[in-house]
Image (tube, rainbow, N blue to C red):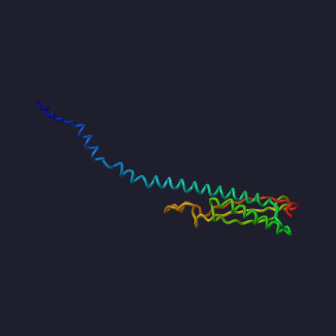
Amino acid sequence: MKPVATLTVRSPVKRIHARRALAQRGSTAVEFALLFPLFFTILYSIITFSLIFVAQQNLTLAAEEGARAALNWQSNTSLQTALVNRGNAACAAATLMAATLVKSAQCTPTSAACGPGNAMQCVKVSLTYNYKASPLVPTLPLMSFALPSALSSSATVQLNPENIQ
């Protein structure tokens, strides 16, 4: 005996759900296509500003290490040449320290009288990085308005004139 074919009748509610499922096919892909650029921009901005923050911290650390290097004795013939030599040594140390992340940082050493009654000498190490000319990551269009044009940091060390020469 042959089995009798049964006819399945769907209820109207099931048919409506089936039609809705067919009508909404692909809507997830469209929603993803609309929202992906926004989410990507937010993620890329977080990464960019995190790297800028790390670069700023790197410059600060390098300036501090450069100022510490100015404490080391350098050969000299006078107080002024001693300050110049210590400033150059400070910039060499600061540039070497900053080179791990920020390769083109510019260092400027300055020295001046400071302290109570200007009895002491101060060596200031200033590091500047032109972020606009060489960003760490490529910038997205319209994002350059929110990015800094330069990063800078400085550190100062106070020297006793009796111990400089």
Outermost residue toward the right in this view: 162
Outermost residue toward the top in this view: 1
In the image, taking residue 56 as reference, residue 39 lies left or right, namely: left
Give the quadrant of residue 65.
bottom right
Compared to 47, does 78 lie above or below?
A: below
Count of all numbered marks drawn on residues in the image: 0
The x, y position of residue 91, in whole percent, is 73, 64
The x, y position of residue 41, in whole percent, is 48, 55
**Quarter containing the C terminus:** bottom right
Q: Nearer the viewer, residue 122 or 67?
A: 67
Compared to 8, does 138 lie above or below?
A: below
Outermost residue toward the front in this view: 1
Give the quadrant of residue 15.
top left
Residue drawn at x 12%, y 32% is: 2
Give the quadrant of residue 86.
bottom right
Q: Nearer the viewer, residue 143 or 106?
A: 106
Q: Nearer the viewer, residue 68 or 116?
A: 68
The x, y position of residue 146, in whole percent, is 55, 60
Residue drawn at x 33%, y 49% is: 27
Compared to 113, does 50 lie above or below?
A: above
In the image, taking residue 50 as reference, residue 141 lies left or right, namely: left
In the image, taking residue 101 as reference, residue 86 lies left or right, namely: right
The x, y position of residue 114, in whole percent, is 81, 61
**Quarter containing the N terminus:** top left
